Image (cartoon, helix red, strand yellow):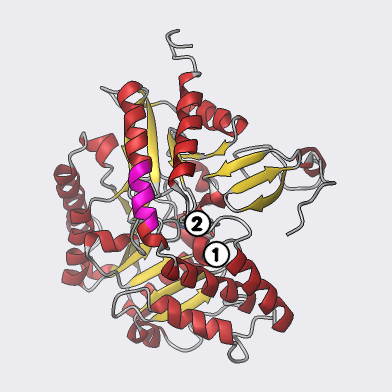
Amino acid sequence: MTTPTDDRLDLAALAKPHLTPVLGRYFERSWSHGVGHRLFDTDGKAYLDFANGIAVSALGHHHPAVTAAIHEQVDRLIVPTGAIGYAEPVVRLAAELAATFPEPLDTVFFLNSGSEAIEGALKLARRVSGRQAIVSFRGAFHGRTIGATSVTSSNINYRRGYEPLLPEVHIVRFPSVYADFDGDEDRATRTCLDELRTLTRSTVPAEAIAAVLIEPVQGEGGYRPAPAAFLRGLRSFCDEHGILLIADEVQTGFGRTGRMWAFEHAGIVPDVVCVAKAIANGLPLSAIVSSRELQERWGRSAHGSTYGGNPVACAAGLAVVRTIRDERLVENAAARGAELTAGLRRLMAEDDRIGDVRGPGLMVGVELVQDRATRSPDGETCDELVARCADDGLLVLSCGLAHQVVRWIPPLDVTSAEILEGLEIFGDALSRIPRAGGGGS
Ligand SMILES: Cc1ncc(COP(=O)(O)O)c(C=O)c1O
């Protein structure tokens, strides 16, 4: 590839008069290009990219297989053909993506974004079940369209001023093991399943619920894994009452958690899975995956999309799925994730501002606290830490209601040396942040 040399631009200044001020940004930096696991700013400074466009470029930047697939398809056919027939990369990606799922999840509906996949899944659930109610979990983030906003509660800013949202959405407690249950997974599981059952006794009958929607690991909400027993309990609850279980794997999918799909950790199979982000390593693409039977019941023309399943994005998606499979990147995510978590736990042993380090795989959250005993979140230190890491050449992001969790999202093909490099920058940046109350340097 050619490396741009003439773009030492302050894009933030250029953006000011015309680019929307609505979008929230972690940084005001100006980006030039990406190579492998490094992102370069317009001054030529390299950053070890453990943010990856929020879990999008899971194979890093300018991955040769993905880039080649895109180039080849651009020269052949760009226009989406979904409404007029079939294009080869679309059909092949459906088959190869379906092959990564357990039975009976064998049928793929392509869309463009995570929000659209959620939106479509909610429509599928209502149409197929003839029921209206949807259950989602406090702290969840499912996207920005009105349907997806209705099931989102990770921050009031996503909802404020948009009410009334979809009717018949019930938001129940998520088993946030660290923050709410002293690390006790069993109690978290019992309490939250009880709350769900209470909902069906007090507010909405189970036979009115079309779907339960959950992120197996909450993303925006703070990198909070649902206990496996909780997911198994949800599966049983849904089976008992004929409710569809929808897994939002938009952030957790494609090997991120050390399994191809995060629900596999719990040994369950959801009825519907929404995937996006890493699917095409940066091109817009998402999908709803379910059994064929379910989509047949959804019905012809019950849903559609002009751009969904764009052949260029699908060609990139094929390269992604094949690279993950052929280079055994799910295994790499599990192994490198274990190294990352171990390294962060060593830092936690030395610094009590770290209250929790939690995986799974390469979806690792580090929760900053003011006080380990009370677990009171420390968003200020976290923001400062993320900013200092970037100054020192490491991109990590924050999440959680108070921005108190540093989220690590390294590429799936990250090396041990890069994990060590990231840990060193991170540990050094934290050690240089003065402690509230004056201790430290
Ligand atoms: C778990 C989850 N679901 C849905 C979405 C929405 O995806 P998109 O921004 O592509 O609409 C996101 C985006 O961050 C997400 O993390």
Q: Quadrant of the N terminus?
A: bottom right
Going by the picture, which residue comes out furthest to the right?
6
Looking at the image, which residue sits at the far top?
A: 438
Q: Which residue is mark 1?
A: 113
* Residue 371 in view, yes or no: no
Identity of the residue drawn at 37% across and 34% down:
344
Q: Earlier in the sequence, mark 1 or mark 2?
A: 1
Under mark 2, the amino acid is Gly
Examine the image and state in which quarter residue 285 appears.
bottom right
Q: Position of residue 110 (x, y in %)?
A: 51, 76
Query: Foreground residue, 235 or 102?
Result: 102
Whether the residue carrying mark 1 lies under 8 Å from ligand 1 is answered with yes
Which stretch is magenta?
A: 332-339
Instruction: Return the x and y of residue 356 as percentages of the image width and height.
Output: 32, 33
Q: For the image shown, how many numbered marks are present on the structure?
A: 2
Whether residues under marks 1 and 2 lie with C-beta atoms below 8 angstroms apart, the answer is: yes
Instruction: Please name the residue that numbered disc 2 is placed on.
Output: 143
Give amino acid for label 1: Ser
Q: Which quadrant of the view contains residue 293?
A: bottom left
Q: Position of residue 38 (x, y in %)?
A: 61, 47
Answer with left or right where residue 102 lies relative to residue 305: left
Q: CA distance from mark 1 to mark 2?
A: 9 Å
Helix, strand or loop for disc 1: loop
Closer to the camera, 338 or 178?
Answer: 338
On screen, 436 above or below 54?
Answer: above
Residue 163 vs 391, above or below: the answer is below
Picture quadrant where residue 266 is located = bottom left
Main secondary structure type of the part rendered in magenta: helix
CB of mark 2 near ligand 1 (< 8 Å): yes
